[in-house]
Image (cartoon, rainbow, N blue to C red):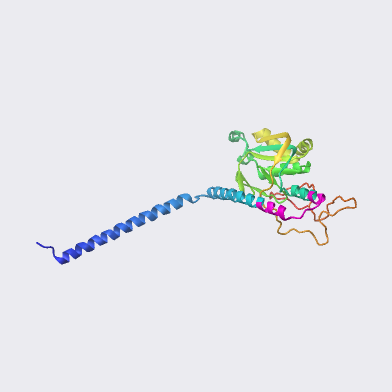
Amino acid sequence: MTEHPRRRRVRTGTVAVGIVLALAGVLFAANARLAQGQESRAPQSLQDLAVAASDRLAKLTTQVDSLRADVEKLTTEQAPAGTAADSAQTSLVEIASGRVPVVGPGLTVQLTDAPADSLRQAGVRPDDLLVHQQDLQVVINALWAGGAEAMSLQGQRVISTTAFRCVGNVLSLHGRLYSPPYVIRAIGDPKKLRASLYASPQIQVYLQYVDAVGLGWSVNSSSALTLPAYEGTTDLQYASVPAGIDVLASTADGSTTDTPGTPAVDPTPSPTTSEGSPSAP
């Protein structure tokens, strides 16, 4: 008995529809898995976004360091031979701008949050247990006032354009996030730096909380601190030397003097404001 042609056509059409549906199901499943994988790799919270941005910044910083080294090498090769005085002035400007590492005696100051069990004390608030932005500012300002010649915060060089900000219980500095303890290093006369720290009324208030709730505080002298070079750019967008002002003008005896609108050869950077950025003179 032979199969009717109409039945054969119906059966063939049914098989074709089944194959199309099966392929469609495979495609939908593959797209679903791909979408799920993409979602799992994407940051799901503000903290994840901050960490991802910080990681990306670290990679870009490495690339910038490599490119900067290439630029400095090419600049050195192309620059005409100058006098010894010009070379000395260039070195001093590089030190003042934080473009080169520096070594010298100084202090290391460390601040950290108080233990959580201090909340059991009567009248103690959660904010009392944290190191705040203003605490770091008063320490940095006191060290500048004590004659600090160079400084770092969390291992990053602090220069005239440095700005930092506390976001919750973490510190944002040069695009990176840091948790306590916070470490400040300053190069200068250790005795004068220490005296300036403890002469600050704001630091005396902080020390009261050290005794009351256990905020972390330590000051250590060192005969040889090493501070890194600043990793970012030092290009100014809005500041310029006024017309008619010579940068590092020479005196009659051949030495250099600072003139208005000119960066100091051996400067003490300005104190920081409440926003964590240097204040105007």
Query: Residue 108 appears in which quarter of the rendering?
Result: top right
Q: Tell me if 4 is positioned left or right of 44 in this view.
A: left
Give the percent coordinates (x, y) of residue 227.
70, 42
**42 or 118: nearer the viewer:** 42
For the magenta stretch, what is the residue range?
A: 70-87
Give the residue drawn at x 71%, y 46%.
100
Pick out the residue farthest to the left. 1
Residue 231 lies in the magenta-colored region: no
| Quarter occupied by the N terminus | bottom left
Above or below for 195 versus 165 = above
Query: Residue 182 appears in which quarter of the rendering?
Result: top right
Give the residue drawn at x 69%, y 34%.
218
Residue 83 lies in the magenta-colored region: yes
User: Can residue 33 be seen here?
Assistant: yes
**212 or 255: nearer the viewer:** 255
User: Can residue 264 be seen here?
Assistant: no
Query: Residue 221 appears in which quarter of the rendering?
Result: top right
Give the percent coordinates (x, y) of residue 128.
64, 39
